[in-house]
Image (cartoon, helix red, strand yellow):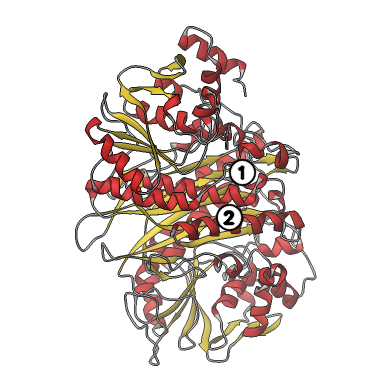
Amino acid sequence: MSLSDSDHDLVVEELGREPTRAEAALFENLWSEHCAYRSSWPLLSAFDSEGDQVVVGPGDDAGVVSIPSDGDETYITMGIESHNHPSYVDPFDGAATGVGGIVRDTLSMGAYPIALADSLYFGDFDREHSRYLFEGVVEGISHYGNCIGVPTVTGSTAFHDDYEGNPLVNVACVGLIDDPDRLVTAEAQEPGNKLLLVGNSTGRDGLGGASFASEDLAEDAETEDRPAVQVGDPYTEKLLIEANEALIDEGLIESARDLGAAGLGGASSEMVAKGGLGADIELTNVHEREPNMNAMEYLLAESQERMCYEVRPGNVERVKEIADRYDLGASVIGEVTDGNYVCTFEGETVVDAPAAFLGDGAPYNDLPAEEPAEQPRDLPEGVALDEAFEAVVGSPNTASKEWVYRQYDHEVQVRTATPPGDDAAVMAVREAGTGLAFSSGADPNWTAAAPYEGARAVALENATNVAAKGATPHAAVDCLNGGNPEKPDVYGGFKGIVDGLAEMCSTLDVPVLGGNVSLYNDSVAGPIPPTPTLALVGVKDGYEVSEPNDSEGSRASPYSAPPAALSGEGDLLLVGARSLEGDAEARLGGSEYLAQFGGTDRFPESLDNPDAFVDTLVDVADDEATLATHDVSHGGLAVALAEMISDEAGASVDLDAPSKGSPAALLFGEQAGRVVIETTDASAVREAFDGVAPVYDLGSADDSGALGVALADGDLSYGAAEIASLRDVIDRELD
């Protein structure tokens, strides 16, 4: 590891001397792209992070917002992180430790983790290596999440050839703070307070993980970079979760930071820098599991399941007692000061630098950006509708993801009211009497075709997902993934997804509480598509489990979220799109249809007033006459309808009107901000959306257990079993 020449010169100028070996390594990691956001920070001011509900915005381990409560004030935390490079090198441990890290970010705010979301991106599903990574990552997430007792309730999985050399693993976590007095931040409070390292012992695993995450993956990364991948122990993490609760219960913690990127050096220096303070740290006090470790290894090892706590001197022994109760190590490694950040090792000072310079001294990069070219219209010809339907509905991108989420325990903690497989999960926050809808994901086809407009669509789709379950979008975090920013075309695409995501979130009045940036996702296979994963929560009054519709065609409870599955009792409406107004509006850019059959097209623009659409959808979804709601996005209307039918309920759909556009555009266009609604009061839905968004009659639901679609160029008809067989491609290929 070594500092660049320009960074080295800055460090020498600030310190007035050559840095020690430990200092040089610490600066390299803390000033890496992964930690310092050197190429992305100038763009991130585009995000609006303010709102009456925001308690803690960007800059801490997780964002904090208040949620509606029928009792005492209640907060939730939101955080997201990437473990992309580690998951390529070691898919099981790389993904597992990603879960562990985002859970500890939640703990460091004083919150209890209640829900996880995973958004995963791999190369073409037909490739053996992609499947190897896919299976290993899912196994790692399920193992860690299931062992620690935190349910994985939502997420997304996408396959795109440009992820072959660099998959993405983005994991989000929601935590609960049921008493505002329990809130903790990473800002050190007072000189004289002690710094304690609590949790697992420290080894040499994960050395240089931050710098490893800030460079392109080499061809031999799977073997050469394995030491940079952390190894997790979920059973210790579970003990740490419960110990953290006990420490917060007794008010023993003044500030906290989990040990992630750059290990102890990163966590401890960032804590004191946030408080405008310093620290004296004795590295030999760290409890270790490997002999003969040197100062740099103590500072930068990313061994898992460790927390750094600031504790008043009089509370140190009690913290040690609680750690011992949970079989966790606890070391007093130093104390907070009003001077520099100083680390000693075996009687020698190995680090002596201003904490603020360590954390915030890295200069930002001023990089050139090229605007991506607009896609021309070059559509495939001669594709039969039945061939297209079967290819799109049966694509791994749009197929059932049950193979993934059935490996996750989504019932643990008994909060899951709407489980995985729907547009959004709904969690019961009984402490507040509130339902919390949770959606996470992105679509690489969209942002590869049009980074800016595709990112706008990603934000609108996630908001539509929670609104379709009757929840008002409340807050979000993002994970912005890009390739090598030193390439102008790559940086231009990354800038596009930042601007697009930020603009739509602002339009929807959804504060972005923070997130993660992962650049240099580039390999010998080339850069990844710019990928803006958004994790978004919405709030609703009540949290009852969605019950089947009753015999009179109404939902069992107004508090339950309308399901995506049809009841077979109501009329079908398509709301929120211009795609039935002719070919000029029915674009196929970014669609799975073009991914299957080739060709290009301009990406369809979002609605003119997406905020009004989302707000109205919340009200309509909560109406008892609404029997089912389902977002129309990946795969278009064809996939949405295929996902809604079952053996008990089918649909008869009429799109047989030349003025409505080409059959391919009608069925497979992927304009965001659309929803299919099954209702017993179609006139009320039309009235609600009058002046907000178009409403089209699609037909009606029935008890046929089949999907029939009438089109100008011919009819389509598929039974529920045929569609299920198409959609089971992942299960069929992997089991």
* Residue pointed to by mark 2: 140
Q: Nearer the viewer, mark 1 or mark 2?
A: 2
Q: Quadrant of the C terminus?
A: bottom right
**Residue lying furthest top:** 16
- Quarter of the picture holding the N terminus: top right
Q: Is residue 45 left or right of residue 25?
A: left
Left or right of residue 403: residue 281: left
On the question of residue 321 being in view, the answer is yes
Taking the spot 30% from the left edge, 19% from the top edge, the residue there is: 338
* Front in this rendered view, residue 387 or 236: 236
Q: Do labels 1 and 2 touch, CB within 8 Å? A: no
Q: What residue does disc 1 label?
A: 86
- Residue 602 in the image: above or below residue 253: below
Closer to the camera, 676 or 662?
Answer: 676
The answer to whether any part of residue 442 appears in the image is no
Residue at horizontal 46 percent and vertical 47 percent from the top: 102
Against 241, residue 272 (above or below) is above
Which element type, helix, strand or loop, lies under badge 1? helix
Q: Amino acid at mark 2?
A: Gly
Give the image quarter of residue 337. Answer: top left
Estimate the spatial distance between the alpha carbons at disc 1 and disc 2, rounded to whole Å. 12 Å
Q: Is residue 343 left or right of residue 493?
A: left
- Mark sitting earlier along the chain (1/2): 1
When the figure is inspected, residue 484 is found, relative to residue 557, above or below; the finding is above
Q: Position of residue 465 (x, y in %)?
A: 46, 64
The image position of residue 649, as x and y in percent, is 53, 87
Element carrying mark 2? helix
- Amino acid bearing label 1: Pro
